[in-house]
Amino acid sequence: MKNKLMLVFMAIALTMVSCSQDRIEEPSQNETAEVSRPYNALNYLELVPMLEHYDKTRKPVLEEALGYEDTRMNYYSIETIENYLKYVKTLSREKGIKFTGINFVSAAYPENTGHGVPNYQNLLLMPTTEINGKNISFDPVQSTSEKIVTVKEMLASYGYNWVYDSKEDYDSRNKPNELVQRNFQNRSKSSDVESGAGNRGQISPPY
């Protein structure tokens, strides 16, 4: 009889432990998280002159060249940003790569774009990692645990010369690169592969 009672009590105890592990503890309504102001947060006397300077030095030039006002805002929902960061963090962690940040890169939708608005500017999101002490855009999809594949390498394989990783690259941007030129000529024969870059935000203008 005692053995049976002990078994019953053990079963109840195990059930209670299991339930307590499955239960999600909700934070108390009275708890307030202490958040300090980020170092990159702006005051309005910093913000307004930056917007005005863009209006004076960039907007008129772009409007004259394009014939319309180009994109000013790129919107990404919180869910989109969080999902993208989680994806890149997971891939980087699995491959043992240090994920240091995101480069926001200016681009423009081509005439035959499959998404977005043709001819309007947009932003590309490119993950970065530290290489030789610099934050370099890399591809977490094409990289492996043995080798970090940079965006520069991937773009070169499609015939695009990426010159923004270093001053040396930028200073020699006008020098012909035979490999890039050859890959550019053969781009139509290249197979398409997934990249680690992000896009597909909502832009405005146009409205």
Image (cartoon, rainbow, N blue to C red):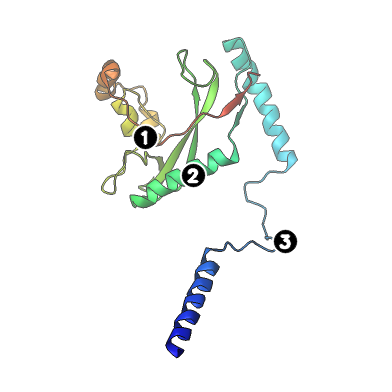
Neighbourhood count class around disc 3 (C-alpha, 10 Å): few under 14, some 14–19, many 20 upward: few
Q: Residue at x 66, y 46 (%)?
A: 41
Q: Tell me the distance, in whole angstroms, between the alpha carbons under discs 2 and 3.
A: 28 Å
Query: Mark on residue 43?
Result: none
Secondary structure of the residue carrying tag 1 is: helix
Quadrant assignment for the N terminus: bottom left
The residue drawn where x is 38% and y is 39% is 138
**Point 52% across, 15% down: residue:** 118
Residue occupied by mark 2: 85
Determine whether label 2 and label 3 are within 8 Å by CB: no
**Residue with the mark numbered 3:** 29
Q: Label 3 sits on what residue type?
A: Gln
Q: How far apart are marks 1 and 2 (CA)?
A: 17 Å
* For marks 2 and 3 on the same chain, the one whose residue lies earlier in the sequence: 3
Residue 8 % position (x, y): 48, 80
- Nearer the N terminus, badge 3 or badge 1? 3
Task: Indicate the position of residue 144 as horizontal and vertical percent values.
Answer: 29, 45
Report if residue 29 is visible in the image.
yes
Q: Mark 1 points at which residue?
A: 151
Relative image position of residue 110 (x, y in whole percent): 47, 16
Quarter assignment of residue 4: bottom left
Q: Do the residues labelled 1 and 2 touch (CB within 8 Å)?
A: no
Say which element carries label 3.
loop
